[in-house]
């Protein structure tokens, strides 16, 4: 039994043995190397692309399955924030549930803005892609909420 290594952890990796290898392999499955294996901040947040054009910036965010009422876009001082708040709670009548789950999630991304016209920012959501057009300008920014068309 001493030759078994739980969860694919190898003991003989070329490093000097310290005597704690057996201890780590016993508790390795109980105390995972990360709290949520296979998850990371970058994998859990939505992706954004920022393209600079001659007179504007184009910000595109991948938001498949998200409705526009679940998205908030705000500009304050020198940053634009995109926040998604989702709650899934499908009620089905006439079912005798033994187990039922609900899901709620919130994600945000911020983009630093400099020398843009905050009054002319426009946003649209089409086929799961949020597009935000931010015109360039030489005046100071002001705070406002952006409506999605």
Image: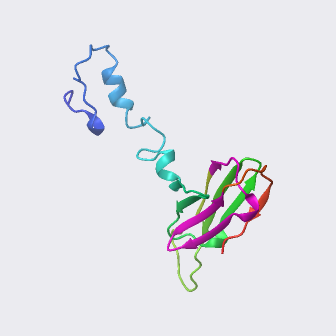
Residue at 73%, 55% in the rendered image: 75
Q: Which quadrant: the C terminus?
A: bottom right
* Viewer-proximal residue among 135 and 106: 135
Q: Left of 24 or right of it: where is 103?
A: right
Numbered disc total? 0
Q: Which residues are magenta?
A: 110-135
* Viewer-proximal residue among 68 and 100: 68
Q: Left of 32 or right of it: where is 17?
A: left
Which quarter of the figure has residue 134? bottom right
Asked if residue 87 is among those painted magenta in the image, a careful observer would answer no
**Residue 42 spot, x, y in % from top left:** 49, 47
Q: Left of 116 or right of it: where is 63?
A: left
Residue 25 against residue 86 in the figure, above or below:
above
Q: Is residue 87 visible?
A: yes
Q: Is residue 102 visible?
A: no
Residue 88 against residue 44 in the figure, above or below:
below
Asked if residue 121 is among those painted magenta in the image, a careful observer would answer yes
Q: Which quadrant: the N terminus?
A: top left
Which quarter of the figure has residue 32? top left
**Residue 19 spot, x, y in % from top left:** 31, 14
Residue at 28%, 33% in the rendered image: 9
Residue at 26%, 17% in the rendered image: 15
**Residue 125 spot, x, y in % from top left:** 58, 72
Looking at the image, which residue sits at the far bottom? 94
Residue 58 against residue 111 in the figure, above or below:
below
Residue at 21%, 33% in the rendered image: 4
């Amino acid at each position: 039994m001493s030759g078994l290594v739980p969860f694919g952890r190898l003991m003989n990796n070329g490093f000097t043995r310290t005597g704690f290898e057996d201890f780590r392999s016993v508790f390795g499955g109980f105390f995972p190397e990360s709290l949520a294996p296979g998850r990371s901040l970058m994998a859990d947040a939505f992706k954004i692309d920022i393209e600079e054009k001659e007179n504007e910036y184009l910000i595109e965010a991948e938001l498949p399955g998200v409705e526009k009422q679940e998205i908030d876009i705000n500009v304050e001082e020198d940053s634009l924030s995109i926040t998604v708040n989702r709650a899934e709670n499908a009620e089905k009548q006439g079912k005798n549930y033994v187990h039922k789950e609900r899901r709620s999630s919130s994600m945000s991304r911020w983009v630093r803005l400099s020398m843009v016209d905050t009054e002319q920012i426009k946003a649209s959501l089409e086929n799961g892609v949020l597009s935000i057009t931010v015109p360039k300008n030489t005046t100071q920014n002001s705070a406002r909420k952006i409506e999605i068309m």
